[in-house]
Image: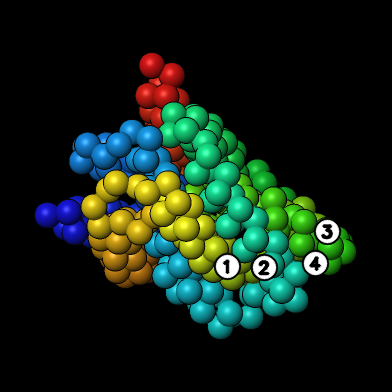
Amino acid sequence: MELIIFLIIGALAGFAAGLFGVGGGTIIVPLLFIVFTQMDYSPDSIMHLALGTSLATIIVTSISSLMAHNKKGAVMWPVFKNLAPGLAIGCFLGAGIAGQISGLYLQLIVGVFLLWVAYKMFFDGKKQVVNHANDVHGANTELPSKPKQLAAGGVIGIASAIFGIGGGSLTVPYLTRYGVVMQKAVGTSAACGLPIAIAGALGFMFFGMQQQVNVPNTIGFVHIYAFLGISIMSFFTAKLGAKVAHILSPELLKKCFAVLLTVVGCYFLFKGLI
Protein backbone atom coordinates (compact mmCIF):
# COMPACT_ATOMS: atom_id res chain seq x y z
CA MET A 1 0.00 0.00 0.00
CA GLU A 2 2.86 2.40 0.87
CA LEU A 3 4.55 1.79 -2.48
CA ILE A 4 1.29 2.55 -4.35
CA ILE A 5 0.99 5.89 -2.52
CA PHE A 6 4.58 6.78 -3.44
CA LEU A 7 4.00 5.78 -7.07
CA ILE A 8 1.04 8.18 -7.14
CA ILE A 9 3.18 10.97 -5.60
CA GLY A 10 5.85 10.28 -8.22
CA ALA A 11 3.29 10.47 -11.02
CA LEU A 12 1.97 13.81 -9.73
CA ALA A 13 5.43 15.26 -9.05
CA GLY A 14 6.82 14.26 -12.43
CA PHE A 15 3.77 15.52 -14.31
CA ALA A 16 3.82 18.83 -12.45
CA ALA A 17 7.58 19.24 -13.00
CA GLY A 18 7.12 18.78 -16.75
CA LEU A 19 3.94 20.86 -16.88
CA PHE A 20 5.10 23.86 -14.86
CA GLY A 21 8.81 23.75 -15.69
CA VAL A 22 9.97 23.52 -12.07
CA GLY A 23 11.98 20.98 -10.13
CA GLY A 24 10.04 18.12 -8.58
CA GLY A 25 11.27 19.04 -5.10
CA THR A 26 8.71 21.83 -4.74
CA ILE A 27 5.99 19.19 -5.22
CA ILE A 28 7.61 16.16 -3.55
CA VAL A 29 8.50 17.82 -0.22
CA PRO A 30 4.93 19.03 0.60
CA LEU A 31 3.33 15.74 -0.54
CA LEU A 32 5.77 13.60 1.46
CA PHE A 33 5.27 15.83 4.49
CA ILE A 34 1.51 15.18 4.35
CA VAL A 35 1.91 11.41 3.73
CA PHE A 36 4.54 10.93 6.46
CA THR A 37 2.33 12.89 8.88
CA GLN A 38 -0.59 10.54 8.10
CA MET A 39 1.73 7.57 8.72
CA ASP A 40 2.28 8.86 12.27
CA TYR A 41 6.05 9.21 11.91
CA SER A 42 7.86 11.20 14.58
CA PRO A 43 7.15 14.94 14.08
CA ASP A 44 10.85 15.64 14.65
CA SER A 45 11.81 13.46 11.65
CA ILE A 46 9.02 14.09 9.13
CA MET A 47 10.44 17.23 7.50
CA HIS A 48 13.98 15.80 7.42
CA LEU A 49 12.69 12.62 5.75
CA ALA A 50 10.75 14.66 3.17
CA LEU A 51 13.85 16.74 2.31
CA GLY A 52 16.30 13.81 2.19
CA THR A 53 13.98 11.62 0.12
CA SER A 54 13.23 14.50 -2.26
CA LEU A 55 16.94 15.01 -2.97
CA ALA A 56 17.43 11.26 -3.54
CA THR A 57 14.66 11.19 -6.18
CA ILE A 58 16.22 14.18 -7.97
CA ILE A 59 19.25 11.97 -8.79
CA VAL A 60 17.14 10.03 -11.29
CA THR A 61 15.23 12.98 -12.76
CA SER A 62 18.36 15.14 -13.09
CA ILE A 63 20.11 12.43 -15.14
CA SER A 64 17.16 12.37 -17.55
CA SER A 65 17.06 16.17 -17.74
CA LEU A 66 20.84 16.48 -18.11
CA MET A 67 20.90 14.07 -21.06
CA ALA A 68 18.09 15.95 -22.83
CA HIS A 69 19.75 19.37 -22.40
CA ASN A 70 23.20 18.04 -23.34
CA LYS A 71 21.84 16.76 -26.67
CA LYS A 72 20.82 20.34 -27.47
CA GLY A 73 24.27 21.66 -26.48
CA ALA A 74 22.76 23.71 -23.65
CA VAL A 75 25.16 22.59 -20.87
CA MET A 76 28.10 24.91 -20.18
CA TRP A 77 30.53 22.24 -18.95
CA PRO A 78 33.36 24.62 -17.89
CA VAL A 79 30.89 26.50 -15.66
CA PHE A 80 29.54 23.18 -14.34
CA LYS A 81 33.10 22.11 -13.40
CA ASN A 82 33.61 25.35 -11.47
CA LEU A 83 30.30 25.11 -9.60
CA ALA A 84 30.10 21.33 -8.98
CA PRO A 85 32.68 20.96 -6.12
CA GLY A 86 31.04 23.79 -4.17
CA LEU A 87 27.58 22.43 -4.86
CA ALA A 88 28.50 18.94 -3.64
CA ILE A 89 30.37 20.07 -0.51
CA GLY A 90 27.76 22.70 0.31
CA CYS A 91 24.85 20.29 -0.10
CA PHE A 92 26.48 17.62 2.07
CA LEU A 93 27.16 20.19 4.81
CA GLY A 94 23.67 21.62 4.29
CA ALA A 95 22.22 18.20 5.11
CA GLY A 96 24.16 18.30 8.38
CA ILE A 97 22.85 21.80 9.12
CA ALA A 98 19.29 20.69 8.33
CA GLY A 99 19.76 17.74 10.69
CA GLN A 100 20.45 20.17 13.53
CA ILE A 101 17.36 22.30 12.83
CA SER A 102 14.14 21.18 14.49
CA GLY A 103 11.31 19.87 12.32
CA LEU A 104 9.19 22.88 13.32
CA TYR A 105 11.74 25.46 12.12
CA LEU A 106 12.33 23.49 8.91
CA GLN A 107 8.58 23.69 8.20
CA LEU A 108 8.70 27.47 8.58
CA ILE A 109 11.84 27.81 6.43
CA VAL A 110 10.43 25.65 3.62
CA GLY A 111 7.07 27.46 3.87
CA VAL A 112 8.75 30.84 3.31
CA PHE A 113 10.81 29.38 0.45
CA LEU A 114 7.68 28.05 -1.31
CA LEU A 115 6.04 31.47 -1.02
CA TRP A 116 9.17 33.01 -2.58
CA VAL A 117 9.05 30.54 -5.49
CA ALA A 118 5.32 31.26 -5.90
CA TYR A 119 6.02 35.00 -6.04
CA LYS A 120 8.76 34.46 -8.64
CA MET A 121 6.52 32.27 -10.80
CA PHE A 122 3.53 34.61 -10.61
CA PHE A 123 5.55 37.63 -11.75
CA ASP A 124 7.80 35.66 -14.11
CA GLY A 125 6.16 36.89 -17.31
CA LYS A 126 7.85 40.30 -17.38
CA LYS A 127 11.24 38.78 -16.56
CA GLN A 128 10.88 36.25 -19.37
CA VAL A 129 10.31 39.09 -21.84
CA VAL A 130 13.53 40.76 -20.64
CA ASN A 131 15.45 37.48 -20.82
CA HIS A 132 14.12 36.84 -24.31
CA ALA A 133 15.29 40.27 -25.40
CA ASN A 134 18.74 39.50 -24.01
CA ASP A 135 18.76 36.16 -25.85
CA VAL A 136 17.91 37.87 -29.14
CA HIS A 137 20.63 40.47 -28.79
CA GLY A 138 23.13 37.95 -27.44
CA ALA A 139 23.77 39.97 -24.29
CA ASN A 140 26.47 38.39 -22.21
CA THR A 141 28.74 39.60 -19.44
CA GLU A 142 31.72 37.84 -17.94
CA LEU A 143 31.06 35.26 -15.25
CA PRO A 144 32.83 35.62 -11.88
CA SER A 145 36.24 34.03 -11.27
CA LYS A 146 36.59 30.30 -10.49
CA PRO A 147 36.93 30.84 -6.70
CA LYS A 148 33.79 33.01 -6.71
CA GLN A 149 31.86 30.40 -8.72
CA LEU A 150 33.06 27.73 -6.27
CA ALA A 151 31.82 29.85 -3.35
CA ALA A 152 28.50 30.50 -5.10
CA GLY A 153 28.15 26.74 -5.62
CA GLY A 154 28.67 26.22 -1.89
CA VAL A 155 25.90 28.67 -0.98
CA ILE A 156 23.49 27.17 -3.54
CA GLY A 157 24.36 23.66 -2.28
CA ILE A 158 23.63 24.51 1.36
CA ALA A 159 20.30 26.13 0.44
CA SER A 160 19.35 23.20 -1.80
CA ALA A 161 19.81 20.73 1.06
CA ILE A 162 17.74 22.80 3.48
CA PHE A 163 14.92 23.22 0.90
CA GLY A 164 15.16 19.68 -0.56
CA ILE A 165 15.47 20.94 -4.16
CA GLY A 166 17.78 20.40 -7.13
CA GLY A 167 18.95 24.01 -7.05
CA GLY A 168 17.33 25.20 -10.29
CA SER A 169 15.43 27.96 -8.48
CA LEU A 170 18.80 29.35 -7.39
CA THR A 171 21.28 28.34 -10.12
CA VAL A 172 19.25 29.73 -13.05
CA PRO A 173 18.90 33.27 -11.55
CA TYR A 174 22.62 33.19 -10.62
CA LEU A 175 23.69 32.44 -14.21
CA THR A 176 21.19 34.76 -15.94
CA ARG A 177 22.34 37.58 -13.65
CA TYR A 178 25.69 37.45 -15.48
CA GLY A 179 24.10 37.46 -18.92
CA VAL A 180 23.95 33.70 -19.63
CA VAL A 181 21.08 33.08 -22.05
CA MET A 182 18.08 31.31 -20.53
CA GLN A 183 18.43 28.04 -22.47
CA LYS A 184 22.05 27.55 -21.37
CA ALA A 185 21.27 28.64 -17.80
CA VAL A 186 18.52 26.01 -17.57
CA GLY A 187 20.70 23.33 -19.22
CA THR A 188 23.67 24.01 -16.93
CA SER A 189 21.35 24.12 -13.92
CA ALA A 190 20.02 20.67 -14.91
CA ALA A 191 23.59 19.33 -14.86
CA CYS A 192 24.24 21.01 -11.50
CA GLY A 193 21.23 19.18 -10.06
CA LEU A 194 23.14 15.88 -10.17
CA PRO A 195 26.01 16.67 -7.71
CA ILE A 196 23.48 18.47 -5.50
CA ALA A 197 21.16 15.46 -5.40
CA ILE A 198 23.90 12.86 -4.86
CA ALA A 199 25.73 14.81 -2.14
CA GLY A 200 22.46 15.86 -0.48
CA ALA A 201 21.05 12.32 -0.41
CA LEU A 202 24.32 10.93 0.99
CA GLY A 203 24.39 13.73 3.56
CA PHE A 204 20.83 13.08 4.75
CA MET A 205 21.60 9.35 4.91
CA PHE A 206 24.82 9.89 6.89
CA PHE A 207 23.54 12.50 9.35
CA GLY A 208 20.24 10.65 9.71
CA MET A 209 22.09 7.46 10.70
CA GLN A 210 24.03 9.47 13.27
CA GLN A 211 20.71 10.43 14.86
CA GLN A 212 19.40 6.82 14.67
CA VAL A 213 16.07 7.60 13.01
CA ASN A 214 13.47 5.08 14.18
CA VAL A 215 11.37 4.86 11.00
CA PRO A 216 10.88 1.62 9.00
CA ASN A 217 12.29 1.24 5.46
CA THR A 218 14.72 4.14 5.77
CA ILE A 219 18.46 4.75 5.50
CA GLY A 220 19.06 7.79 7.66
CA PHE A 221 16.67 10.49 6.44
CA VAL A 222 15.93 8.78 3.08
CA HIS A 223 12.80 6.62 2.78
CA ILE A 224 13.65 3.73 0.40
CA TYR A 225 10.10 2.89 -0.75
CA ALA A 226 9.33 6.56 -1.36
CA PHE A 227 12.57 6.97 -3.30
CA LEU A 228 11.84 3.98 -5.55
CA GLY A 229 8.16 4.78 -6.16
CA ILE A 230 8.66 8.48 -6.87
CA SER A 231 11.78 8.00 -9.04
CA ILE A 232 10.18 5.36 -11.25
CA MET A 233 6.94 7.26 -11.93
CA SER A 234 8.32 10.80 -12.19
CA PHE A 235 10.81 9.67 -14.85
CA PHE A 236 7.91 8.81 -17.18
CA THR A 237 5.26 11.38 -16.26
CA ALA A 238 7.62 14.38 -16.57
CA LYS A 239 7.68 13.81 -20.34
CA LEU A 240 3.86 13.68 -20.42
CA GLY A 241 3.64 16.91 -18.43
CA ALA A 242 6.03 18.63 -20.85
CA LYS A 243 3.83 17.59 -23.81
CA VAL A 244 0.66 18.92 -22.14
CA ALA A 245 2.47 22.18 -21.32
CA HIS A 246 2.91 22.84 -25.05
CA ILE A 247 -0.85 22.48 -25.59
CA LEU A 248 -1.99 24.78 -22.76
CA SER A 249 -1.12 28.40 -21.99
CA PRO A 250 2.21 28.40 -20.08
CA GLU A 251 1.48 31.74 -18.43
CA LEU A 252 -1.87 30.54 -17.06
CA LEU A 253 -0.26 27.28 -15.90
CA LYS A 254 2.50 29.08 -14.02
CA LYS A 255 0.03 31.39 -12.29
CA CYS A 256 -2.16 28.45 -11.26
CA PHE A 257 0.91 26.66 -9.90
CA ALA A 258 1.98 29.83 -8.06
CA VAL A 259 -1.42 29.88 -6.34
CA LEU A 260 -0.97 26.20 -5.37
CA LEU A 261 2.51 26.89 -3.93
CA THR A 262 1.11 29.88 -2.01
CA VAL A 263 -1.51 27.63 -0.42
CA VAL A 264 1.09 24.96 0.45
CA GLY A 265 3.55 27.56 1.79
CA CYS A 266 0.83 29.11 3.99
CA TYR A 267 -0.09 25.59 5.14
CA PHE A 268 3.49 24.99 6.33
CA LEU A 269 3.64 28.36 8.08
CA PHE A 270 0.21 27.92 9.69
CA LYS A 271 1.01 24.36 10.85
CA GLY A 272 4.40 25.47 12.16
CA LEU A 273 3.04 28.47 14.07
CA ILE A 274 0.02 26.86 15.78
In the rendered image, which residue does mark 3 sit on? 148
Q: CA distance from mark 4 to mark 2?
A: 26 Å
How packed mark 2 is, by other alpha carbons closer than 10 Å (few <14, some 14-19, many 20 or more), is: many
- The reply to whether discs 4 and 2 touch (Cβ–Cβ < 8 Å) is no
Disc on the earlier residue, 1 or 3: 3
- Scheme by which the image is coloured: rainbow
Name the amino acid, label 3: Lys
Q: Is residue 116 visible?
A: yes
Residue 129 in the image: x percent, y percent?
Answer: 67, 51
Among numbered discs 1 and 2, the one appearing first in the sequence:
2
Q: Which residue: 67% across, 46% down?
A: 127
- Residue position marked by numbered label 4 in the rendering: 138
Spatial CA span between label 1 and label 3:
18 Å
Question: Given the current orientation, which residue lies at the most extreme left position?
Answer: 1
- Distance between the alpha carbons at the discs numbered 3 and 4: 24 Å
Q: Determine the secondary structure under disc 4.
A: loop
**Residue 20 percent across, percent down from the top left:** 44, 53
Left or right: 41 as drawn, with respect to 199: left
Q: Measuring 70% from the left and 62% from the top, which residue is drawn there? A: 86
Q: Is there CB contact under 8 Å for labels 1 and 2? A: yes
Quickly name the residue at label 2. Answer: 84
Element type at marker 1?
helix
Q: Which mark is residue 195?
A: 1
